[in-house]
Image: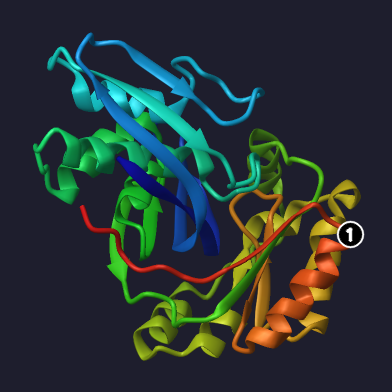
């Protein structure tokens, strides 16, 4: 079975503090997009698990979330899986590429084995692979809380053009969390406002409230994030923000021609740019 692993974007991202077990307590509005990886998943009768991750620098062992998800799903069955990834989601971009691949494997194996586990059960399995996997199982739009595993489905973002651009550097997630913990300013996303705008189908209302607290602690080395945001705004984006812990930035457009022009302008300077649209919930 060939299945799409949809990329994810953060319409908002807030860090509320630390939990008793040492994890960060998050509150995020997350959106799946059509752009993503394709995975070819095949059951094997000999119990072996293999993966071609699509890029030589990506792990092909137990560190790979897609392989980990396959082992979790097929545990105790005697079956294995052969997985081949056509990789498109940029690595270290804040778009949940590894989590999306794991979720896609769970959906594929659910169909191939005929088990047809409900979404709730797939999310529980996915959480054992990674905190973002449950959202990627569901796709669509959701409020994610806790480590990202407490999900509330939301109305899908109104259809629009989305330009995504990743500068040619990665950002250290542990380093950014450390900076957020020590920051003095406490500006936060207007999460209730985003939820109300989604409920009303108000694209401009959502776009005005795009906010990611990690942008507040970027340093001058990461200035391309703000350069990309300026290009997107100058080319007509209703709003633009960094997704996750970066370094990819996206802008929402209600004008397809303006989005195309922004994409072309950014593509002349940055290699990893693409156009996409929001996608609704997946069929599990």
Percent from the top left, x then y, of residue 130? 40, 34
SS of the residue at dot 1?
loop
Nearest to the observer: residue 21 or residue 50: 50
Whole-percent x, y for residue 134 in the image: 32, 46
Query: Where is mark 1, residue-wise?
Result: 269
- Image spot of residue 66 (x, y percent): 40, 30
Kindly identify the residue that appears in the image at 47 percent across and 72 percent down: 191
In the rendering, at what x and y percent does residue 204 appear? 56, 89
> Residue at coordinates 46% horizontally, 90% vertically from top-left?
202
Point 51% across, 86% down: residue: 203
In the image, 238 versus 159, the foreground residue is 159
- Tell me if residue 72 comes above or below residue 135 in the rendering: above
- Asked if residue 220 is positioned above or below residue 76 in the image, the reply reads below
**In the visual, does 266 lie left or right of 118?**
right
Near-viewer residue (146 or 236) = 236
Horizontal side of 21 relative to 48 (left or right) equals: right
Q: Is residue 141 visible?
A: yes
Label 1: how many residues lie within 10 Å, few (<14), some (14-19) or many (20+)?
Answer: few
């Amino acid at each position: 079975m060939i299945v799409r692993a949809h990329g994810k974007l953060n319409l908002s991202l807030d860090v509320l503090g630390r939990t008793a077990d040492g994890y960060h307590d998050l509150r995020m509005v997350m959106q799946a997009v059509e752009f993503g990886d394709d995975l070819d998943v095949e059951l094997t009768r000999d119990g072996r698990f293999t993966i071609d991750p699509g890029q030589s620098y990506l792990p092909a062992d137990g560190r790979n979330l897609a392989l980990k998800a396959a082992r979790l799903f097929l545990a105790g069955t005697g079956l294995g899986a052969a997985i081949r990834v056509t990789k498109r989601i940029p690595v270290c971009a804040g778009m949940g590429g590894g989590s999306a691949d794991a979720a896609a494997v769970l959906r594929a194996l659910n169909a191939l084995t005929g088990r047809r586990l409900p979404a709730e059960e797939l999310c529980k399995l996915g959480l054992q692979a990674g905190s973002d996997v449950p959202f990627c199982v569901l796709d669509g739009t959701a409020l994610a809380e806790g480590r990202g595993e407490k999900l509330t489905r939301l109305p899908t973002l109104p259809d629009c053009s989305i330009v995504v651009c990743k500068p040619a550097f990665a950002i250290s997630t542990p380093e950014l969390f450390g900076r957020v913990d020590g920051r003095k300013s406490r500006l936060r996303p207007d999460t209730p406002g985003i939820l109300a705008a989604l409920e009303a189908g108000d694209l401009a209302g959502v776009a005005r409230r795009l906010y990611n607290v990690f942008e507040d602690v970027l340093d001058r080395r990461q200035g391309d994030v703000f350069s990309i945001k300026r290009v997107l705004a100058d080319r007509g984006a209703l709003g633009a923000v960094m997704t996750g812990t970066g370094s990819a930035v996206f802008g929402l457009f209600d004008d397809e021609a303006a989005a195309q022009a922004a994409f072309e302008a950014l593509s002349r300077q940055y290699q990893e740019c693409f156009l996409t649209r929001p996608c609704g919930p997946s069929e599990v």
